[in-house]
Amino acid sequence: MKSDSSSTSGAGNGAKPGSADPATLGYEAARDELAEMVRRLEAGGLSLEDSLMLWERGEQLAETCQRHLTGARERIESVIATREQRADAHPLPD
């Protein structure tokens, strides 16, 4: 019977990374999986092919994290800009 190591985020004996498309993951899920990829790579003992698979997955996860962080930054900047525009339109009396 064949075992399916892709059903987890790569926590089995093989180095196969998680099967979820990184682009569909939320920030926290992508960050946590990326941290696990780094931990496994730093631990060593993997074949070159397994290391490359993990590294490629890590690159995808890092891109997803960056996309989420960029979106959050843009939202914060938008809220601040809106607040500043309202303050400029309605200054407090002296």
Image: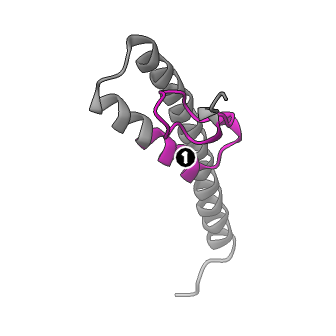
What percent of the width, then of the height, locates residue 11? 49, 40
Give the residues in magenta: 7-35
Left or right, 37 with reference to 87: left
Q: Which residue is mark 1?
A: 69
* Residue 87 pos. (x, y %): 62, 72
At label 1, the amino acid type is Leu
Is residue 48 positioned above or below 64 on the image? above
Q: Residue at x 56, y 43 (%)?
A: 30
Give x and y (percent) for residue 34.
Answer: 47, 39
> What's the image's color scheme?
one colour
Q: Is residue 45 left or right of residue 3?
A: left
- Nearest the eye: 88 or 37: 37
Q: Residue at x 28, y 32 (%)?
A: 43
Residue 55, x across and y down, in percent: 45, 23
Q: Residue furthest front?
A: 1
Q: Is the N terminus in the top left, top right, bottom left or bottom right quadrant? A: top right
Whether residue 29 is in magenta: the answer is: yes
Magenta-span inclusion, residue 26 = yes
